Image (cartoon, rainbow, N blue to C red):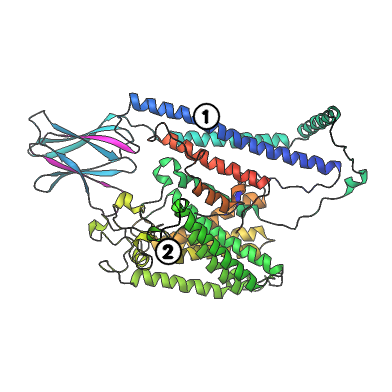
């Protein structure tokens, strides 16, 4: 998913005047930045050094304690059948809504009293599953056991007859305890928390006058000694003493650090989950309805893009730019984003010209390009260059940021009506009208090839199956068979809505820019309102609402839910970073300032060292987590270095 600019600890640059005092401030700022970089480098070195150790421990654990055949997120289940007839073993994930059971295998009849037959199976440990035992050849359910198996654990399921009156009894016994695969996450969190604490303490210590004075005195003496000992040292020109009274130049920029920090938070999480997120299920996209961490970040980036559109267009209009020139710029930028997106998701261009037959057209940057273009055009239609003359005393002033732009809101509402019409009224061949399910084994297998309903049908009709995403997340649990693109055509309408809600946040900042409390209260009001809409649409459930939260569909409830979170999170970041200045936005500020470069870079160089290496144990969550954290930390450091050199990639 594409983004913008942010990351690490940020200190404002003081423009140095030719005087002794400004020079000291500059040295202090450089020292603090060096400390920030050193801290980030230490974190990276620690992670790299820990990787071989973790791999060695994991490998040793497999040799002595685990079953070599088991992979990540798997456990061994031994089914012992004491019945006089064979049984069929099936399973279903509890995260699979109204799904068919999938067959594991058949266990032969017992050999005699006290002599059960046994068959070993491998089961998934990501979610709780239900194991069903049926008799064969007559399909008769004997028992059904919900159980959450642990990774690399060894379990036995006993199927036996107690007596004629009680029928069949099924029970699960743990033969070998599973490993705790979440310990690496806890360790990683503690390490990063410790580094953040050390940096915060170091910053406080550096702020003490005594420490500053000592460092500056040591620095001055070392500089004097260096000049004395250097035969070729340049002559030092001492500025006049009168320069000390000159004030530093004022900066005209009032850029809100909270926006770049918010963008950086989204971007860093996005990079981490795109690299694998330690192969944990909650760092992967939800198979269909519901939310995971991976489902949060793309909409947030779209949201903050809309906020930036409002602020940038207002600033350019105030500077005298014409709307036509800004429209041309928006079209050109959208075209560049779209082209870059096509290149990034079709990496075979390195081997020659792109082949049209299998070229995927939709993508993250492509959706960003489309959303940016539409929302920028809507804002150019209604944006006001001068806001100072607008009164805030009228009875309608509490809704001024909404009512002044009603034509744009009308266009967005019409687009949403179009989405609702196509989603719930468009006839789809061999599928029920208004179907929002995953197809496959969902809905009891009645609509196998109806994945996504109207959204999937429109994509296959306009783009063709070969130009869509071939491995959708719905295959993980629902075993879908046809391609489905989560960045498809119909969902782009709701991504426009998400960007436009971000634009609304920008309008709030513009109209209440001198009243931080009003900005925060407006953010909370919008967040609460969108939360109520989401509760109504979903009926506060994952699968049983009118419109479930669904990232693959970019459903209306998905947008309202994530926009609710975005308003609240932006309010918190704004309060902490820009209002009270308790936090500089580090480390997220720096990648947020160079979001396009970080996103494109992490996609292009994903398979190269140091972002990826050959692991000692590819079935270890710990080593995957270390690798993904190191890769993400590398992009944080790169963005910091680029920020320090004032290198930004802007389109």
Q: Which is more toward the observer, 440 or 178?
A: 440
Residue drawn at the location 47% of the way across and 27% of the way down: 53
Residue 291 x %, y %: 41, 52
Looking at the rendering, the stretch of residues picked out in magenta corresponds to 71-100
Q: Which is more toward the observer, 165 or 609?
A: 609
Residue 284 x %, y %: 41, 47
Q: Secondary structure at mark 1?
A: helix
Q: Which mark is residue 49?
A: 1
Residue drawn at the location 40% of the way across and 29% of the way down: 58
Q: Secondary structure at mark 2?
A: helix
Residue hosting label 2: 491
Question: Could you tell me which quadrant the C terminus lies in?
Answer: bottom right
Does residue 182 appear in this view?
Answer: no
Calculate the distance from the C-alpha at mark 1 to the C-alpha at mark 2: 43 Å
Does residue 372 appear in this view?
Answer: yes
Indicate which label's residue lies in the foreground, 1 or 2. 1
Q: Dot 1, crowdedness within 10 Å: few (<14), some or many (≥20)? A: few
Disc 1 vs disc 2: Cβ atoms closer than 8 Å? no
Q: Which mark is residue 276?
A: none
Q: Is residue 436 magenta?
A: no
Question: Residue 304 falls in which quadrant of the image?
Answer: bottom right
Q: Earlier in the sequence, mark 1 or mark 2?
A: 1
Residue 262 x %, y %: 57, 52
Marks counted in the figure total: 2
Residue 84 x %, y %: 7, 36
Residue drawn at the location 80% of the way across and 40% of the way down: 24
Q: Is residue 511 above or below residue 275?
A: below
Q: Which is more toward the observer, 163 or 239?
A: 239
């Amino acid at each position: 998913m594409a983004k913008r600019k942010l990351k690490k600890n940020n200190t404002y640059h003081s423009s140095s005047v030719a005087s002794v005092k400004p020079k000291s401030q500059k040295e202090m700022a450089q020292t603090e930045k060096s400390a920030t970089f050193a801290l980030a480098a230490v974190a990276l070195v620690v992670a790299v050094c820990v990787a071989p150790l973790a791999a060695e421990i994991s490998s040793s654990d497999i040799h002595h304690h685990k079953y070599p055949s088991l992979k990540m997120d798997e456990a061994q289940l031994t089914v012992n059948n004491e019945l006089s007839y064979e049984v069929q073993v099936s399973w279903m994930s509890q995260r699979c809504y109204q799904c068919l059971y999938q067959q594991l295998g058949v266990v032969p009849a017992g050999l005699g009293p006290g002599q059960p037959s046994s068959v070993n199976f491998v089961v998934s440990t990501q979610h709780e599953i239900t194991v069903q035992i049926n008799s064969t050849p007559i399909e008769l359910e004997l028992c059904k056991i919900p159980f959450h198996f642990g990774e690399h654990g060894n379990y036995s399921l006993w199927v036996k007859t107690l007596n004629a009156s009680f029928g069949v009894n099924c029970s699960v016994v743990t033969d070998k305890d599973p490993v705790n695969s979440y310990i690496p996450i806890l360790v990683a969190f503690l390490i990063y928390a410790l580094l953040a604490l050390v940096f915060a303490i170091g910053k406080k210590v550096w702020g003490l006058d005594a420490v500053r004075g000592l460092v500056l005195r040591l620095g001055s003496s070392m500089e004097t000694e260096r000049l004395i000992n250097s035969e070729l040292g340049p002559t030092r020109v001492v500025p006049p003493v009168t320069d000390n009274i000159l004030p530093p130049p004022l900066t005209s920029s009032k850029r809100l650090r909270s926006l770049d920090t918010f963008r950086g938070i989204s971007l860093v999480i996005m990079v981490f989950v795109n690299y694998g997120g330690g192969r944990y299920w909650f760092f992967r996209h939800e198979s269909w309805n519901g939310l995971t961490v991976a489902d949060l970040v793309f909409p947030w980036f779209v949201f903050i893009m809309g906020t930036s559109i409002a602020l940038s267009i207002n600033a350019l209009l105030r500077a005298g730019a014409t709307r036509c020139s800004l429209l041309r710029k928006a079209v050109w930028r959208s075209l560049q984003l779209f082209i870059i997106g096509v290149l990034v998701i079709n990496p075979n261009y390195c081997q020659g010209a792109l082949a049209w037959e299998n070229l995927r057209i939709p993508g993250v940057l492509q959706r960003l390009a489309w959303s940016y273009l539409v929302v920028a055009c809507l804002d150019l239609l209604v944006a006001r260059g001068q806001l100072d003359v607008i009164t805030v005393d009228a009875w309608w002033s509490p809704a001024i940021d909404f009512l002044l732009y009603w034509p744009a809101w009308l266009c967005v509402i019409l687009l949403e009506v179009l989405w609702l019409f196509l989603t719930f009224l468009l006839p789809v061949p061999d599928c029920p009208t208004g179907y929002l399910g995953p197809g496959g084994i969902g809905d009891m297998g009645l609509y196998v090839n109806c994945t996504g309903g109207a959204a999937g049908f429109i994509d296959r009709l306009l783009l063709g199956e070969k130009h869509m995403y071939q491995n959708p997340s719905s295959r993980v649990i629902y075993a879908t068979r046809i391609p489905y693109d989560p960045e498809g055509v119909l969902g782009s309408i709701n991504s426009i809505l998400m960007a436009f809600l971000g634009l609304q946040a920008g309008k709030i900042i513009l109209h209440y820019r001198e009243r931080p409390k009003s900005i925060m209260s407006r953010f909370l009001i919008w967040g609460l309102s969108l939360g109520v809409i989401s509760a109504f649409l979903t009926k506060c459930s994952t699968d049983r609402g009118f419109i479930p939260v669904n990232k693959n569909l970019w459903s209306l409830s998905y947008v309202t839910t994530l926009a609710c979170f975005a308003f609240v999170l932006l309010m918190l970041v704004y309060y902490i970073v820009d209002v009270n200045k308790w936090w500089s936005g580090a480390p997220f500020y720096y990648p947020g300032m160079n979001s396009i470069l970080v996103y494109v870079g992490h996609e292009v160089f994903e398979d190269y060292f140091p972002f990826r290496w050959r692991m000692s144990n590819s079935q270890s969550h710990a080593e995957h987590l270390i690798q993904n954290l190191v890769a993400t930390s590398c992009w944080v450091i790169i963005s910091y270095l680029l920020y320090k050199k004032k290198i930004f990639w802007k389109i």
